[in-house]
Image: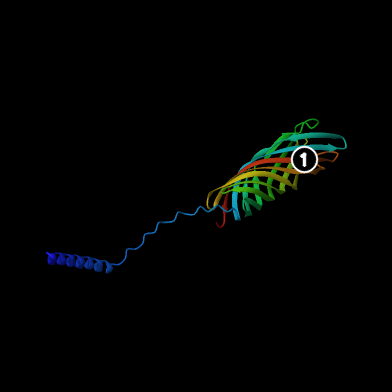
Amino acid sequence: MHRCLVASVAVFALGVGAASAADLGRPAAAPVYAKAPPLDVPFSWTGFYVGGHVGWAGIDDSQALSSPTFALTVPNSPSGLIGGGHAGYNWQINQWVLGVETDFDGTSINSTYGIGAPFVDTTGTERLDWQGSLRGRAGVAFDKALFYGTGGWAYGHFTDSYDTAGPTFHQSVSSNRDGWTVGAGIEYAFLPNFTGRVEYRHTDWGTHTNNLNVFLAPPGVSNDRVTENQVTLGLSYKFGR
């Protein structure tokens, strides 16, 4: 009986040893690594950008017509579509964003108005041919959303015309004007390199004097005081990430 027990133990030991040897001959299984979750990198506003915009603008114009024989104030409020391009650069420091931007617009702002007594059958026409600006921007960013203010120098080209029927007197005066502009906007990065914006600006073109030596007899002047309000929607492409 003892011999049977010893033989059984020996057979078991040999089996275990053979199995262990077989395991040692097999290559170890490759480790399985879990894929790390993507990092949520905050959007950066730093970099150059270019874009386009369209919108609406309205002008408040008060002309003071005068000559040695009369003085007359003529109000006018033309409005129309504007559209153009813009380009700029932003620097982001923590949540704060500072930048500089320039833009240029063509406009459809054009209106004809009656001048009134003592000018019977007399009309004036005002047109804002184009405008542009060079501005600073400053705002606070909440990841992909930017709330900003903007302000700086504005420039534009105006054409004023005056017509009187039979006998006909006509005079057209063109002028380049400077002013200041200020406003605010909201911009959002809806794709890694594309942002959309809505912006409001108020522009003060100051007072410009047109010499009317043909339309008015004796010769006189028009002191033209103009302000403008505009709202635009814009799309920008931001270079880099």
Quickly name the residue at label 1. Answer: 225
Seen from the viewer's position, the closer of residues 96 and 206 is 96
Quarter holding residue 11: bottom left
Q: In the drawing, does residue 192 fall left or right of residue 14?
A: right
Can residue 49 be seen at all in this image of the molecule? yes
Seen from the viewer's position, the closer of residues 241 and 62 is 241
Name the residue furthest left: 1
Q: In the drawing, does residue 28 fall left or right of residue 177?
A: left
Q: Which residue shows up at 71% across the image and 49% down it?
A: 152
Instruction: Count the numbered circles shown.
Output: 1
**Image quarter hosting the N terminus:** bottom left
**Image quarter hosting the C terminus:** bottom right
Quarter holding residue 67: top right
Q: In the drawing, does residue 145 fall left or right of residue 110?
A: left
Q: Which residue shows up at 22% across the image and 68% down it?
A: 18
- State whether residue 17 is above or below residue 97: below
Seen from the viewer's position, the closer of residues 128 and 234 is 234
Is label 1 in a helix, a strand or a loop?
strand
| Percent of width and height locating residue 197 | 59, 45
